[in-house]
Image: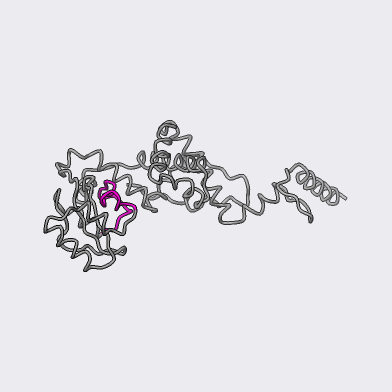
Amino acid sequence: MKKWVLGIAGVLMTMSLAACSKTVATTSGGKITESEYYNSMKKTSSGKQILQQMILDKVLEKQYGDKVSDKKVTKQFDDYKDQYGSSFSSVLSQNGMTKSSLKKQIRSSLLLREAVKANTKITNKQLEKQWKSYEPKTTVAHILVAKKATAQEIIKKLQSGGDFTKLAKQYSTDTASKSKGGQLSAFDNTDTSLDSTFKKAAFALKQGEYTKEPVKTSYGYHVIKSVKKPAKGKMSDHTAELKTQIIDNKMNNSSSLQSIVSKVLKKGNVSIKDKDLKDVLSNYLSTSSSSN
C-alpha cells in the first residue's frame, strides 16, 4: 500500500511539473514544453557546450567584470564594424549572429583575456624570446597577379621608373586593395590573416623598397613595396607590446586556455545541480597544470 501511494505521488508530481512548464511550441500532434526541450537539449553536445559557456561567463563576470567596461566592448565592436564596412550586417547574418550577440561574445572574450593576464607571470626570458620574432607595425602595398611572368614584367616596369600605384590599379587582381594603389592595413608579426611567406618578404624590405623577385603564395604572385617601416629599436622600448603579444599567444593556445579556465572555474565554486550534467565540467575541473 505504501509503495503504491508513493508511486501515485510520483506520477502526480511529474504531471504537476509538466503542467507548470511553459509551452515552447504547439503542433497538431501535441505541444512541446520547456522541460521536454531542456531534457532533450541537455543530452546533446551542443547543449552541454552552451551550459559550459554560460557557467564560464558567470564566474568570469564575478572575478573580472570590473576590468571590462562597456566602452572596451563598444570599441572592439566598432573596430569589427569598420573592418567589414558595408558588408558588416551580411557577415553577422552568415555567422548566425546579431549585433547584440556579437557584443556578448566580445565581452566574453575580453573577460577571458583578463583571466589569462591575471594568471600569467611574464618573465624576462619570455620577453626576450618574443623579441626575436617581434616586428613593428609595417605598411606595404602589393600587386597580385596570377602568373609569374606578369609579376616579372611589373618588376621590370618599376625598375624603369614605373609608378607602383598606377601599376597596382592596372594589374592587381586584389579588388580590395587595387583602388588604393595596392596598399594594405598595417600589420606586425602577430598578424594571422596574411600568408607567412608574404609577411617574411614584407618585413625584409626597407622603407621604399620593393621585391626584386615575385613572391609566391596560395593566392598567386605578389610584387610588394614597403610604404612605411618603423625602426625596430630596443627591446626596452616595446615591453608593453611584447607583453600584449605573449598574452595574445596564450589566447590562441588551447592547452594554456584550458589550464586557466580550470583555475577560474575552481575558484568560482561551481556546483552542478542536475545529476545528468554533473560531469559537464570534468575536462576543466580535473586540470591542474600551470599556465605559465
> In this picture, is 266 found above or below 152?
above
- The reply to whether the magenta stretch includes residue 179 is yes
Q: Which residue ends up furthest to the right in the rendered image?
A: 1
Which residue appears at 26% of the width and 46% of the height?
186
Question: Relative to 22, is 96 on the left or the right?
Answer: left
In the rendered image, which quarter is residue 23 located in?
Answer: top right
Residue beneath the point at 82% across and 51% down: 7
Give the percent coordinates (x, y) of residue 292. Answer: 32, 47
Count all numbered tags in the image, as a single digit.
Answer: 0
Residue 91, percent from left and from top:
46, 50
Lateral position of residue 181 relative to residue 8, left or right: left
Image-quadrant location for residue 116:
top left
Residue closest to the eye, 195 or 44? 195
Q: Is residue 29 magenta?
A: no
Position of residue 124 in the picture relative to residue 77 (left or right):
left
Q: Say whether residue 188 is left or right of residue 5.
A: left
Tell me the colour scheme of the image.
one colour
Which span of residues is magenta-colored?
Answer: 176-196
215 or 55: nearer the eye?
Answer: 215
Residue at (29, 53) in percent of width and height? 178
From what the image shows, is residue 244 above or below residue 177? above
Q: Main secondary structure of the magenta part?
A: loop
- The percent position of residue 153, horizontal first and vertical second, equals 18, 65
Q: Nearer the viewer, residue 194 or 266?
A: 194
